[in-house]
Image (cartoon, rainbow, N blue to C red):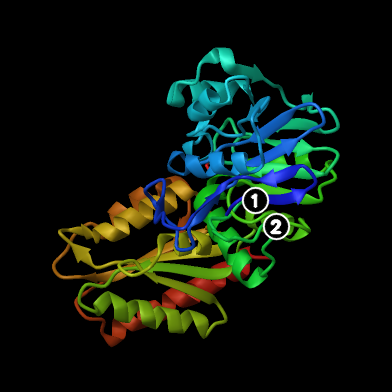
């Protein structure tokens, strides 16, 4: 994307990245992503908000050239992660008069990780303003809307909130405002699951703090902008709440079919009771979809064969991911088949122990499931239904 005008003297100058397959070498990016950098021209000063991932720096530079920008007074860094700040050193070299505005914690990240010289910084506190002449930028510290140093900027006159990772999506589109909710809702939800889910307490606090601002546009640093902003605001309220839904997530692996038969049987038993089931065969599924499903689910049932005396390694990976994403889950169980023994249940229960879930009786059976084993799965479905009825509003 070349430059796009958001409103008079306010431009998108960032870069799309359709080729990138993984974010943080972890999160699949089926729709690519974007690094949204914004330029604001005031009557006296010019500010650039965030930069781009270093491989895309030439695009940012071309965009600034396209707008005839020869001097930048302020570069604002909302977040030290390299997808937004990785080009700072190059920018500071190419714009030698620019001062880098950020908060104290972010300065420390930029100095430690990017070796930005301390002499270039202007440090701001929560609520501080900087005037560009006819435009005023207010800085709001919003810790843990990804990292501890994250902050946002409110452009008072245009009522635009520049939110960095907050309210973003990994969705590359040429359109500045992309209003196809059928596509945007799952993209933003998936991003929330991958990035924001562990920080939902901080998200609620920061949304409370931002409520007092009159916001017409939310301009995140990934994905399309939001106007009107109610759609994304309401979605974040829902996703960051502690409420769970009548849903069961089943990540599973089946090596020779036995665990697969159990998983499918349980799915049928649960859906027959009106419970929504989302299944993820881990050798085929995208972990971002699993993260999105974890936002709402009340229960997780992990399906695994026993291999080398424990869970399948893909299941261990997924269980660890669940542990670190800290979803709202209330209940967990484990189902699967073994050949001659092992410690599958103990190993998995230990991995997810920090989530403090109520563990419902696992159904781990020898060999191919028999009629009596399937009855145990009927029992598990009954228990899940009873637990959901007892704990969901
Ligand atoms: Fe988009 Fe936390 O970086």
The residue under the point 60% across, 31% down is 77
Query: Where residue 256 sits in the image (x, y, percent)?
Result: 20, 77
Q: Is residue 314 visible?
A: yes
> Vertical placement of 35 versus 313: above or below?
above
Query: Where residue 35 sits in the image (x, y, percent)?
Result: 55, 46
Does ligand 1 reach within 8 Å of label 2's beta carbon? no
Q: Are marks 2 and 1 in contact (CB under 8 Å)?
A: yes
Left or right of 301 in this view: 5 = right
Quarter that holds the N terminus: bottom right
Label placed on residue 232? 2
Hey, which quadrant is residue 79 in on the image? top right
Looking at the image, is mark 2 or mark 1 earlier in the sequence?
1
The residue under the point 69% across, 66% down is 179
- Secondary structure under tag 1 reads loop
The residue under the point 86% across, 32% down is 134
Query: Where residue 33 sits in the image (x, y, percent)?
Result: 51, 54
- Secondary structure under tag 2 reads helix
Label placed on residue 167? 1
Of residues 171 and 328, the one nearer the viewer is: 171
Of residues 5 and 179, the one nearer the viewer is: 5
Of residues 136 and 239, the one nearer the viewer is: 136
Left or right of 316 in this view: 358 = right
> Vertical placement of 52 versus 227: above or below?
above
């Amino acid at each position: 994307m070349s430059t796009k005008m958001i409103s008079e003297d306010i431009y998108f100058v960032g870069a799309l990245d359709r080729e990138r397959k993984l974010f943080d070498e972890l999160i699949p990016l089926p729709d690519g992503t974007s690094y949204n950098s914004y330029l604001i021209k005031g009557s006296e000063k010019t500010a650039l908000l965030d930069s781009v991932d270093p491989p895309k720096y030439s695009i940012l530079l071309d965009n600034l050239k396209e707008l005839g920008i020869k001097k930048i007074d302020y570069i604002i860094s909302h977040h030290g992660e390299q997808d937004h700040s990785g080009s700072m050193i190059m920018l500071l070299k190419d714009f030698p008069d620019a001062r880098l505005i950020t908060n104290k914690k972010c300065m420390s990240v930029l100095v430690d990780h990017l070796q930005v010289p301390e002499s270039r910084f202007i440090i701001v506190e929560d609520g501080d303003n900087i005037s560009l002449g006819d435009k005023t930028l207010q800085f709001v510290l919003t810790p843990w809307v990804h990292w501890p140093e994250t902050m946002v900027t409110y452009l008072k006159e245009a009522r635009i909130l520049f939110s960095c990772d907050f309210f973003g999506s990994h969705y590359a589109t040429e359109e500045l405002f992309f209003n196809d909710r059928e596509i945007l809702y799952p993209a933003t939800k998936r991003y929330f699951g991958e990035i924001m889910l562990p920080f939902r307490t901080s998200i609620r606090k920061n949304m409370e703090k931002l409520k007092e601002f009159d916001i017409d546009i939310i301009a995140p640093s990934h994905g399309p902008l939001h106007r009107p902003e109610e759609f994304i605001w309401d979605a974040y309220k829902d996703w960051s709440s502690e409420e769970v839904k009548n849903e069961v997530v089943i990540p599973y692996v089946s090596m020779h079919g036995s665990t697969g038969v159990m998983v499918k049987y349980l799915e049928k038993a649960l859906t027959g009771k009106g419970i929504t089931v989302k299944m993820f065969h881990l050798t085929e599924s995208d972990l971002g979809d699993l993260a999105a499903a974890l936002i709402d689910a009340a229960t997780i049932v992990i399906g695994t064969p026993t291999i080398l005396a424990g869970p399948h390694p893909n299941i261990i990976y997924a269980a660890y991911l669940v542990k670190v994403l800290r979803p709202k889950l209330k209940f967990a169980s484990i189902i699967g088949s073994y050949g001659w023994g092992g410690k599958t249940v103990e190993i998995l229960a230990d991995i997810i122990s920090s989530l403090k879930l109520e563990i419902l009786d696992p159904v781990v059976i020898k060999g191919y499931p028999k009629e009596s084993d399937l009855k145990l799965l009927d029992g598990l479905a009954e228990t899940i239904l009873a637990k959901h009825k007892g704990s969901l509003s």
